[in-house]
Amino acid sequence: MLKKRLSFLWVWALIISVAACGQSREEKAMENEVESTPGAAEPEVAPTPPAATMRPGEMVWIYRGSGSKQCEGGGMTLQQSQAKLSDNGVKVQESRCGVRTDRMFPAVCGAPTGDILMHLIGMDALDASIELGYSPAEKVQYQFAACRDNSA
């Protein structure tokens, strides 16, 4: 009789643990469903057509990290970045600050911030800007943001 009770308890424990595992899988599936919902946490950016479909007179957003460090500030200002491009023959139509949203930046003094410097330039100047250390913004996720004071 004792063996039957122990067997019954063991089977009951097995059923409960299997049911609990199934529930966590369902909860994970629901989390993934919510996370993959279109527009859930997408950056406020107008889509930029792929470079292959752009014509020479079209504009493209480029970016570079500001170089600012947490607790320390520093790095390049938006005006310095714009001047670097202009001094090298790249005509800048518009400049804005932004922040990357496709990476996490740990909150540690001395670690980089997600701040980026963004410029709208002609597609014909893209190669020159890449040589200066900028990249097409279409390759990352970002949001436009207010420029921060780079002093510590």
Image (cartoon, rainbow, N blue to C red):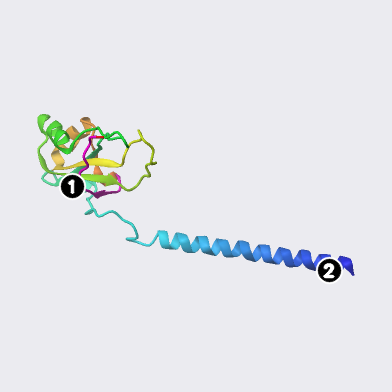
Q: Marks 2/1: CA distance?
A: 74 Å
Is residue 116 depicted above or below 25 in this figure? above
**Disc marking residue 5:** 2
Is residue 31 depicted above or below 138 in this figure? below
- Residue furthest toward the right? 1
Whole-percent x, y for residue 10 in the image: 77, 63
Q: Secondary structure at mark 2?
A: helix
Q: Which residue is mark 1?
A: 54
Whole-percent x, y for residue 44 in the image: 25, 55
Between residue 86 and residue 111, name the one nearer to us. Answer: 111
The range drawn in magenta is 140-151
Crowdedness near tag 2: few (<14), some (14–19) or many (≥20) residues, C-alpha within 10 Å:
few
Q: Earlier in the sequence, mark 2 or mark 1?
A: 2
In the rendered structure, does residue 141 fall within the stretch colored magenta?
yes
Is residue 6 rendered to the left or right of residue 97? right
Whole-percent x, y for residue 70 in the image: 32, 37
**Disc marking residue 102:** none
The N terminus is located in which quarter?
bottom right
Whole-percent x, y for residue 107 in the image: 38, 41
Kindly report the secondary structure that dominates the magenta region of the rendered protein.
Answer: loop
Between residue 43 and residue 52, name the one nearer to us. Answer: 43
Between residue 110 and residue 80, name the one nearer to us. Answer: 110
